[in-house]
Image (cartoon, coloured by chain):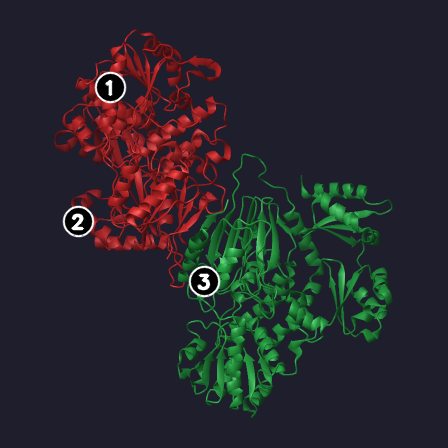
Chain colours: A red, B green
Amino acid sequence: MQVEDRLKELKVTINKKVPRGVTVTDVEFEGPEMVIYTDDPKRFAEDHDLIKTLARDLRKRIVVRPNILGDTEEAYDMIKAVVPETAGITDIFFDTDTGEVLIEAEKPGVVIGKNGSTLRDITMKTGWTPKAARTPPIPSVTIKQVRQYLRESRDERKEFLRRCGKRIHRDSIYTGRDHDQWLRMTTLGCCRQVGRAAFLLSTPESKVLIDCGESPGATGAASSPYLNVPEIYPFNNLDAVVLTHAHLDHSAFIPLLFRYGYDGPVYTTPATRDLATMLQLDYLDVNNKEDRAPPYSSNEIREFVKHTIALGYGDVTDIAPDMKLTLHNAGHILGSAIAHFNVGNGVYNVAFTGDLFYGKSRLFNPAVSQFPRLESLIIESTYGGSDDFSPSRVEAEERLYEVINETLGRGGKVLIPAFAVGRSQELMLAIEEGMRNNRIPKCKVYLDGMIKEATAMHTAYPEYLNTDLRNLIFRDNYNPFLAECFEQVDSYDKRQQVIFSEDPCVIISTSGMMNGGPVIEYLSNLAESPKNMIIFVGYQAEGTYGRRIQKGWREVPIGKRGTIVINMEIQTVEGFSGHADRKQLMNYVQYVQPKPERVFTIHGEESKTIDFASSIYKKFHIQTVSPQNLETYRLV
Amino acid sequence: MQVEDRLKELKVTINKKVPRGVTVTDVEFEGPEMVIYTDDPKRFAEDHDLIKTLARDLRKRIVVRPNILGDTEEAYDMIKAVVPETAGITDIFFDTDTGEVLIEAEKPGVVIGKNGSTLRDITMKTGWTPKAARTPPIPSVTIKQVRQYLRESRDERKEFLRRCGKRIHRDSIYTGRDHDQWLRMTTLGCCRQVGRAAFLLSTPESKVLIDCGESPGATGAASSPYLNVPEIYPFNNLDAVVLTHAHLDHSAFIPLLFRYGYDGPVYTTPATRDLATMLQLDYLDVNNKEDRAPPYSSNEIREFVKHTIALGYGDVTDIAPDMKLTLHNAGHILGSAIAHFNVGNGVYNVAFTGDLFYGKSRLFNPAVSQFPRLESLIIESTYGGSDDFSPSRVEAEERLYEVINETLGRGGKVLIPAFAVGRSQELMLAIEEGMRNNRIPKCKVYLDGMIKEATAMHTAYPEYLNTDLRNLIFRDNYNPFLAECFEQVDSYDKRQQVIFSEDPCVIISTSGMMNGGPVIEYLSNLAESPKNMIIFVGYQAEGTYGRRIQKGWREVPIGKRGTIVINMEIQTVEGFSGHADRKQLMNYVQYVQPKPERVFTIHGEESKTIDFASSIYKKFHIQTVSPQNLETYRLV
């Protein structure tokens, strides 16, 4: 049956099931959801079992929406008029996907009103369902931008969601018994290497791309996944793209897909959507600064945002006639996810870990390791080598405190090159607690580069943080990111001031591998004095300045700046990585439930993926593969 | 540079190199060859080094052709007029690909004339280069048909060869250093199963399909390779199809490619072209008789013939900008070949064995096992299981003589179900020699089904037969296929006569698995008498009548014929297979030169391909893979 006919039939069925007097005016597939439009949304809201019963009977995710959603500009004015000014509204965001309007305010209680009277008033007057939220403690430019993109593209997005909904709910082509069923995974990058993640999952019905990242440090064709092979090109044959997390080695080339004909959904968490947007915009910026023609423009980043369907952890979502996707916490960075696919009504289940951390960090809970079903596990192997054991986070912090104490004690400055997303926030929390508990002296901690913006996003999505940190912020009302030790550097003058001040301090600055960014400015001024110290906390790739300095070079030629003579002390503190080490990886494979039939080791140097695969086979007797790029494996 | 410009430049270069007075009027790529058109082909012919020098300097296969090739009808009349009638001309075949005209005659000496005078006369008068050949001792309907197709499509074929030549000699897209080079093999069928052979070899430049066969006994989608996956479909992206041998599990679906848009060359031996044509036409016939809609018509078989570029064993041939193909004897059936690919100017070399026999048989030499280079070997595994040891051919023949003697001795008839191509001829030769050497009594050996036609083709291509047999036929002037014991059955009446005659005899009849064909007629009439005997000499697949009878069923319901009660004796004589047994396969891997880095075991039941792969790894320490269907492996 055609989708249109199915929708008509559904409308008749639903109208028979709803109580008298309630009229369902329209039924639409919008993205993965079935939306019931009605003149009387309240009746649906009151009879909660009704939606449940419908969802169960029709086996669909159901959303009920008022028939007439007021114009957003009118509604905006209306909300401003209804809510008392004392609420301190900072943003009103209309989510046309859900019919909800998010009202962010300094005092959300005032927005809600006595017993919710103000909210009810808003519903009555605008048709929108209001939600009140506290204004995030640090404003994020990116989130503002993303919301604006979504606002501007409201109509386009509605059209997209309906088109996408129809595609997801299309009839299966191969229903006959005659047809061979199969599920295949094709590796388009990220095998026996770190970077350019891109995997294709395909069945006779559908095709889904998981990640599409760059290879850091590589140039030309080798920097992107293999996107010109017939398995994936032309892109308009893809049913869906799934993004596991925001780092550029997973996300950089997703906008490119839209440039070359992709017009479908990108499923990811809301936090990943926003972080990826920030990193992609920065990627363009870096390309421009280094006189490289970027492969796409900010237009395509907008397209990415417009085409994103945001999913929370645990939402089971139809993404194709024969595939369901569920995202689960991966513990790696804010919003990072393991992508679990249920194929052919559970006939086969496969999980892509993306990047993984299987321990408790200051920010996140450990990666989820329990799934309803699981036959194949595709797992990262960054630290999968037999020697890749990291110190525990506690040991790492002890060591960090030690070297900071040393430096501050002798009146020096500490310079920590760090990635904006993930590692910086872990460091901030460790240093803040160290000062609070008097493990290190109180001093200024300057943040330079995109760190502040990334931190702002962490405070905007508290639901992703682990319980301890969330409790600290919301129950104990103490937000460590706002501690007074932290100070943002956002101008040339301020940077000079930090550099030439007499006071000992800590500076956390991007880029993490000292390949550019403000950290170079600090380096060239602080390098001279042996009182100062660089602390490396992350992997320094071959060919970067960071790697050279770490290896012991004492004269480093840095482009136009000439040669920098390094007299400052150099230390490396291991254990702050966002990646599971060898022990965590082996533990993950041991504890993942249910036990998979097959494990593919990817996202690691050749020797590490092979060693990890062979160790899994020896220890757990699970069939393992360390695939190469451009291969296809039959899963079913 | 565009191909057209290159050709113009080549013409200038060549005109500079040829002796004064000789004019090269045109240079064309026709299929894999570079053809030099001249008004004075004789001068080229006289100065043999000239062509050699050109070929070496230009690194091309060069053919010189007279500028004006006479009209074939005129030339036909001319030849008939010039050659004395006593020559007994039976066929004149104009090969427009080569500019040669093949004159088959009872007395080829008369066609040649005194010191070649008649041939020279023909060249002068027609422009064609004549070749005289003895009329094959048994006329083949199929070869006649094939020649007629080629004759009819002369102009079309010329156009095709030029188009194809331009495609082969196109510029490489990826010449920059920036580009990742790769070579991949995709399995579209024939993995962990016998049948539906189809493999794709692809590089960033080009795509070549090796074989495209049916899965015998399977129905619906499972009977054909996976042809609807993006790696291969649409077919017009293919550069070439290579056919290893004629059996339907390798050739049945090649005509289908032409139905769905393929318009390129099929590289194979001339014998395989003709045998495949016969078997494909029979495939249509069987489909029609069994009321199944055949997937294509005889039109597409004609297209296959028209698009075939016939190669001899050992011809190194450009088939794409970055691939050279060489076919080598595989020892399996007439014209069967190992396809060796040299990719990227020898950067990588891979050989597909097709079906293999690595021992001397009565008909053929053992498969070739020496290659200039070899990194990956894709080898069949039909008898790759650890128990798959066959008796030697000598032992098999001893046993055959024994059971024939028994039956004839008691006045019974021997019925041998056999495949038309390959096994029947081996049996004929064994039985004929047995009678000649008085190992078995002289009696009639009746041939029913396509056996005679297949035998005719063996006599038309003596160059494929092994040295002993060729010597016997041509030096000793004794053609065992023409021995007086053999008698063709080609009518219902004749068949009845054979069945109801009192005389003991041997009957070899198709089909080989007793699933249809005239053998059923014999069975239903000979089954009653315990004096008679069925001898199985080939593999009987599950589900066939042959398998049931072999297993010991004594009452066999055969469709409309009702139930046949089997009183005749049942014997199986092993050792006549055209496939290497386990020992030969292991020997092949041991002796193949150079030693490959990787071996893929295909074309065998799941347990056999896995066992064979693991044994190769254990014994020879070569990396092995037993792939599944629909997988892709990276070779480079």
Q: Residue sitting at 48 percent across and 75 percent down?
A: B513
Mark sitting on residue A495: none
How many angstroms separate mark 1 from mark 3 (CA)?
65 Å
The amino acid beneath tag 3 is Gly
Q: Position of residue A526 (x, y in %)?
A: 36, 12
Q: Chain of mark 3?
A: B
Q: Quadrant of residue B245?
A: bottom right
The image shows residue B95, relative to residue B231, as above or below, that is below
Q: Residues within 10 Å of mark 1 (few under 14, many from 20)?
A: few
Q: Quadrant of residue A565?
A: top left
Q: Which residue is mark 1?
A: A402
Q: Which residue is mark 3?
A: B384
Q: Disc 3 on helix, strand or loop? A: loop
Q: Position of residue A462 (x, y in %)?
A: 23, 30
Q: Is residue B197 visible?
A: no
Q: Residue sitting at 26 percent across and 21 percent down?
A: A400
Q: Residues within 10 Å of mark 2 (few under 14, many from 20)?
A: few
In front here: A35 or A174? A174
Do discs 2 and 1 belong to a common subunit?
yes
Q: Which residue is mark 2?
A: A49
The amino acid beneath tag 2 is Asp
How many angstroms separate mark 3 from mark 2 (CA)?
62 Å
Q: Disc 2 on helix, strand or loop? A: helix
The image shows residue A489, relative to residue A213, as above or below, that is above
The amino acid beneath tag 1 is Glu
Q: Chain of mark 2?
A: A
In front here: A367 or B388? B388
